[in-house]
Image: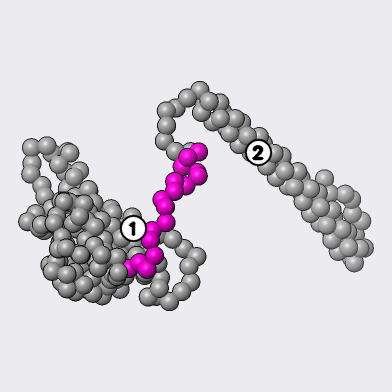
Amino acid sequence: MQLFGSGSIMQQVLDAQALLAERGISADVWSVTSYSELARDAERVERLQRMQPGAQHESYLERVLESVDGPIVACTDYMRALPASIARWVPGHFVALGTDGFGVCESRQDLRKYFEVDAASIAYAALAALRDQGRSLRKGSNHWAMGWVFSTSFPALQTPSFLDRYGLGPFTNRDRRVRRAHRKARQSASALMWCARRTLRDRFKWLFRGALQRAFENRAAQYSISTGYIR
């Protein structure tokens, strides 16, 4: 079992390692300095392999994780997409945990539990990854894990309504008509905005011209200068 941690979430990863050790499951903890740099290095090596098919190149991730065993759980206090950016180059089963969401205001401990990046949630994700790989767990481990995190059962999984409406599917003639209608609507909206901007521009231009005319006449009157209209 491998646990990846970084930044302020590292303490939670270490606590999760201790929880797993209490259940008889050993886990190695890795400190990830930068997921972005790991992904860039792997992409660079991938490009070299594509441009030079005969040459043998190996990324830092592949070299370091070559001999590891067990699933990998990567944790961060950023979005899940950050650790997930290295999933393509990680051997074995990979689980990314992060804080996807916004608009939540609570204590740091409660927020980590809410986003499932606290020690108990990390340990439970590790047990679930082992179960998904078909590893045999000690009897009762699943029940103990449930006691770490959840006091109630999981709610029923529901597909978001926008996925039912805009999810994947074959491209049909109706889709073409809908896209054409949307394009015409955008064009009409753009034309209306152009007319509105042109009208406002002309309006302000004449207002500014009138104000300039009055200011020039007032200044000329002070010096008894005859003036005409500005053309």
Identify the element where label 2 is drawn.
Answer: helix
Amino acid carrying mark 2 in the image: Ala
Task: Tell me the residue that label 1 is attached to.
Answer: 80
Q: Is residue 118 left or right of residue 28?
A: right
The magenta span reads 149-165
The answer to whether residue 89 is above or below residue 72 is above
Q: Is residue 202 left or right of residue 148?
A: right
The answer to whether residue 199 is above or below residue 98 is above
Residue name at image x 46 percent, y 42 percent: 163
Residue name at image x 13 percent, y 69 percent: 24
Judge by depth and name the residue closer to the eye, 140 or 230. 140
Judge by depth and name the residue closer to the eye, 50 or 218. 50
Any magenta on residue 152? yes
Task: Tell me the residue that label 2 is attached to.
Answer: 189
**Residue 29 percent location from the top left of the image:** 17, 68
Asked if one can make out residue 96 in the rendered structure from this viewpoint, the answer is yes
Identify the element where label 1 is drawn.
Answer: loop
